Image (cartoon, rainbow, N blue to C red):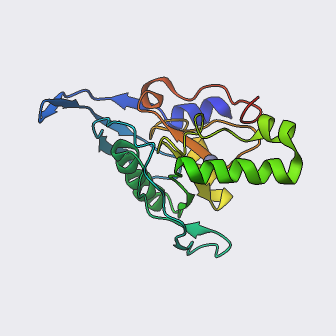
């Protein structure tokens, strides 16, 4: 089954060497689970990290599950934003609605989340399960929490072909962006953040 999925998500690097503004962009084609045909994407250039930027405090309701929100991509890195917007379109082509329940967080937002978990469950639990602001890819503008989980599962099945990988066994909704995942696939799942 895993092999079949892997083949279904096989990524063809086209590498036609588009050069725009001195930045080499790479076009690539990918066939995604549920999509009728291969889609062509062009990478956005990488950008400096935006640690200080604040993410949206809230979004609109996720149209397919009102328990979740659909934030905008404010504060995320431009290459991750471009990849996310392409991913939403690719999901639609495969019949899946992807909502951005949480994207960019500021240092202060992540620290508040960490402190809240310390208060609720204790310092050791928090250290094992929640990343500090310095470690969090949400703070770096490179992580998305995807809902509903049926859509998150679809994204996981793309196995990095769109630049997004699930990273933690206990967070089925959390994906991180790295352009190299498109070529190399996803790293091995860690049990949990901080493990
Ligand atoms: Zn997350």
Q: Position of residue 63 (x, y in %)?
A: 55, 75
Residue 3 placement, left or right of 35: right
Q: How many marks?
A: 0
Vertical comparison of 83 with 60: above or below: above
Residue 58: horizontal and vertical position, in percent? 55, 69
Position of 158 with respect to 153 (left or right) is left
Query: In this view of the protein, can residue 151 be seen by the observer?
Result: no
Is 171 situated above or below 120?
A: above
Residue at image position (57%, 57%) is 102
x and y percentages locating residue 193 in the rendered image: 71, 36
Quadrant containing the N terminus in the rendered view = top right
Foreground: 193 or 83? Answer: 193
113 sits left or right of 122 in the view? left
Query: x, y (%) of residue 4?
Result: 60, 34
75 w.r.t. 41: above or below: below
Image point (62%, 49%), residue name: 110
Can residue 71 be seen from the camera position used here?
yes
């Amino acid at each position: 089954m895993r092999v079949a999925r892997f083949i279904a998500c096989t990524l063809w690097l086209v590498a036609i060497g588009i050069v725009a503004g001195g930045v080499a962009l790479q076009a690539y084609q990918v066939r995604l689970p549920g999509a009728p045909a291969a889609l062509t994407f062009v990478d956005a250039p990488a950008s400096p990290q935006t640690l200080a930027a604040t993410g949206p405090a809230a979004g609109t309701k996720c149209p397919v599950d009102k328990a979740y929100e659909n934030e905008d991509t404010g504060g995320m890195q431009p290459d991750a934003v471009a990849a996310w917007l392409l991913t939403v379109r690719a999901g639609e082509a495969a019949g899946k609605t992807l909502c951005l329940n949480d994207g960019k967080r500021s240092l202060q937002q992540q620290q508040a989340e960490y402190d809240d978990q310390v208060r609720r469950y204790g310092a050791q639990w928090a250290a094992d399960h929640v990343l500090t602001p310095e470690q969090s890819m949400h703070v770096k503008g490179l992580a998305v929490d995807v809902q509903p989980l049926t859509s998150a599962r679809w994204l996981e099945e793309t196995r990095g072909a769109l630049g997004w990988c699930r990273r933690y066994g206990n967070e089925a909704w959390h994906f991180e962006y790295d352009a190299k995942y498109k070529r190399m696939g996803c790293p091995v799942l860690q049990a949990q953040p901080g493990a």
